[in-house]
Image (cartoon, rainbow, N blue to C red):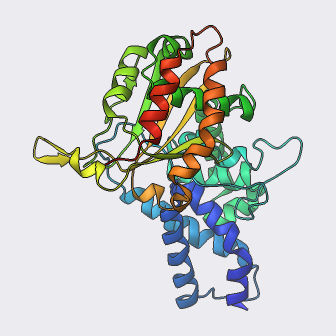
Amino acid sequence: MLEQAIRDHRDLLWGVCYRMLGSPADADDALQATFEKVLTHPPDDSALPLRPWLLRVAINHCRDELRKRNTRASAFWLPGPLETPENDSRFVGSEAPDARYSRMQSVSLAFMVALHALTPLQRAVLILRDVLDLSVAETAEALETSASNVKMALHRARAQLAKGPVRPPLHDRATESRVLQALLVHFAAHNVSALTELLTRDVLLCNDADEDQIAAHRIVRGRDKVMLFQFKTARSGRFAFKVLNGQPALLVELPPKLAPSSGRVIGSTTRELPRRAVLWIELDAAGNVAALHIQTQRRKLEHLPWQALSWASAASQLAAALVSALRFPQRGAWRLRAARALVSAVLRRPQ
C-alpha cells in the first residue's frame, strides 16, 4: 500500500521539490530522500490519508536543504531550466479561471526566481495554497503549523511576489522566439547597430555560474557593457532553440576541446569558459530585450537534451534565425556581412 502511494504521488512530489529547490537534480535527490524516509519510517497511523504526510516529508527535506545552502560567488540566482510539455504530470496545479497562477506560470522561470526570494516556509505555503490550491487547514496539516501561521506566511509571500516580474508575458511565445533568434544572429555577427536598437538602454545580464567558470559573477547593467561581455565570452558551438519552462530558450554547447583552452587564472582559481549554457530573455512592452538570463551551472543543466544538439540541428535552425534577424529590430539596418559572419562563426567546425 505504501509503495503504491509513493508511485501515485511521485510526480506531484517531484514538482513540489522542483519549485522549492529550483533545480531538477536537487528535486531528484529530494524525492529519493523522501522515499527512503517513507519506507524506513512509515506513518504511525496507516489509516490516515497519505498525501498530506508525503507532502510534509518532502517539504521538510527541501526546507532543510534550503537552510544548508551557502552563498556562492554568483550575485544572481537562476533556476535549472527543463522541458515542460503541456501534459507534464509533474506540474499539477489549479486550472480554474480565477486561479492565482496557471499550471505553466507556476513553473515559469520568472516565477522560480521570485520564489527564491522567499523564506523556505513562505515558499512552501505559497506552493501549497496558490499552486496546488490546498485549503488553509490542509496546508497547516502538511506543514505541521497553525492556520494563523499559514495565513501570515501566505500574506508575506504574496506581497513579496507582487514586487517582482511574475506576470503574464507581454508578448506571445512566437514573438519572443523570433527576438531570441535575432539576438543570436546579431551577437554572432557583432552587429552593433542592430543590437543597439534591439537591447534597451538599461538592459540587464544575469549569469548564474559555477565558481570555476568565466562568467558574469555580478549583474551586468547597460547596453554597452552587456554587448562587451557577450563579444568577449561568446564562442562558436552547437546550438538549438527549445521551449523550457514554457518559454523560448537557447541551448549552446562548445566542443569539448574548446572550453579548456580558454582557461585563465583569476586570483588562486583557474577559470574556464562554460562548455554548456542556456540563455533566455525578457522583453519590455515595446518588444525590446530588457534582460538576458544565462545559466551555466553544470548541475542545473544536467536534465536538458544535450544529446540532441549537433551541427546538423544547428544548420536546420539557422534559416529561421536569419529570417528573424531580418525582422528584428524593425528599424535596424541588416548587413549581408552579418549573415556571412553567422554562418562562418556558428557552423564552422573547430579544427
Q: Among all residues in the image, which is located at the extreme left?
A: 268
Q: Residue at x 56, y 22 (%)?
A: 289
**Residue 178 in picture, x, y percent from top left:** 66, 30
- Asked if residue 163 shows in the view, the reply is no
Total label count?
Answer: 0
Does residue 263 appear left or right of residue 118 in this picture?
left
Up the image or down, 153 lies above or below 124; here it is above
Does residue 262 appear left or right of residue 336 in this picture?
left
Of residues 287 and 206, the one drawn nearer to the viewer in this rendering = 287
Q: Residue at x 42, y 21 (%)?
A: 190
Q: Quadrant of the N terminus?
A: bottom right
Does residue 317 appear left or right of residue 174 in this picture?
left
- Residue 250, by quadrant, is top right
Up the image or down, 228 lies above or below 16; here it is above
- Asked if residue 255 shows in the view, the reply is yes
Q: Residue at x 79, y 59 (%)?
A: 87
Of residues 319 and 232, the one drawn nearer to the viewer in this rendering = 319
Up the image or down, 300 lies above or below 328; here it is below
**Residue 317 in picture, x, y percent from top left:** 62, 41
**Residue 122 in picture, x, y percent from top left:** 57, 48
- Residue 329, by quadrant, is top right
**Residue 211 in picture, x, y percent from top left:** 27, 48
Q: Among all residues in the image, which is located at the extreme right?
A: 97
